[in-house]
Amino acid sequence: MSAVLRDAPFAPELVLIPPGEFLRAGCPDGKPPRTASIEHAFAIGRYAATFDGFDFYCIDADLPLQQDEGWGRGNLPVINVSWNDAQAYAVWLSA
């Protein structure tokens, strides 16, 4: 089981991916499975970014909250986020 990391209550849960090798699946177009390697450990989000987490960023950065199109907010995946918004959120989280 991978370690779950979280360094602040508003931050997303991260899962540590250790270095190692794994067998990549083949493709329907006939490419065979092959061994792939991860040279350095890294952490990746355990779940999709949520409205709760993104709202915290927007409030801290004095930005308008993303529209939920009536689907709801909270722990649901955030929608209507541009590539630039996602990049700014990642920089903010890293700080």
Image: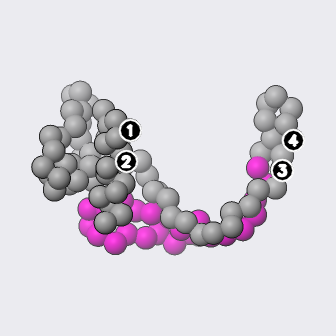
Residue 48 on image: x %, y %? 41, 47
Q: Nearer the viewer, residue 92 or 54?
A: 92
Q: Residue at x 23, y 41 (%)?
A: 73
Question: Identity of the amino acid at label 3?
Answer: Arg
**Quarter holding residue 56:** bottom left
Q: CA distance from mark 4 to mark 3?
A: 6 Å
| Neighbours of disc 4 within 10 Å: few (<14), some (14-19), many (20+) | few
Up-down relation of residue 71 to residue 37 (above or below): above
Mark 1 residue element: helix
Which span is picked out in magenta?
2-24
Residue 6 lies within the magenta run: yes
> Can residue 58 be seen here?
yes
Residue in view at x 16 percent, y 44 percent:
63
Q: Residue under label 3, please give it.
A: 34
Q: Which residue is mark 2?
A: 87
Contact flag, marks 4 and 3 (Cβ < 8 Å): yes
